Image (tube, grey):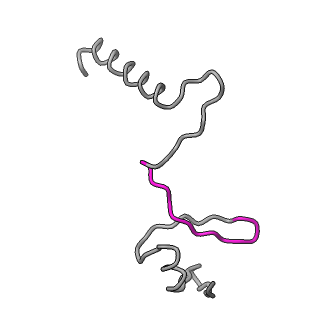
Amino acid sequence: MGMARIYSKGQITIPKAVREATGFNIGDRVVVEARDNEIVLRHPVGVLEFTPPSPPAGEPRWPEARRAAREERAERRSKSGGR
């Protein structure tokens, strides 16, 4: 654990030991979350790593919904002459 001070613009310096222990590097983006009386910093989950939530019962899962949307878009394009 380390200590940090909050400066006038709301900035803090994360102690080097904490950055090294958590894998944060200079210039990294961080997600800032408020949990109860704590501020939590964590690594962001990239878009490619995103797992959509499970759909409601009866709704198609993500791959099926994406496939259906692509098929619908291709059908509209073929009807409009490829525009």
Residue at image x 59%, y 39%? 53
Q: Viewed as shown, does residue 28 lie left or right of 17? A: left
How far from the left and from the top, in percent, is residue 11?
55, 80
Residue 4 found in image quarter:
bottom right
Towards the viewer: 79 or 65: 65
Taking 75 as reference, is 5 above or below it?
A: below
Outermost residue on the top side: it is 79
Specify whether 55 is left or right of 26. right
Left or right of 52, for residue 68? left
Please say if 54 is above or below 78: below
Residues 10 and 68: in front is 68
Residue furthest to the right in view is: 36
Residue 32, position as x, y percentages in the image = 58, 66
Q: Say if 44 sits above or below 22 in the image.
A: above
**Residue 80 horizontal/vertical position (percent):** 28, 14
> At 63% from the left edge and 21% from the top edge, which residue is drawn?
58
Segment colored magenta: 35-48
Locate residue 1: give its quadrant: bottom right
Camera-side residue of 80 and 26: 26
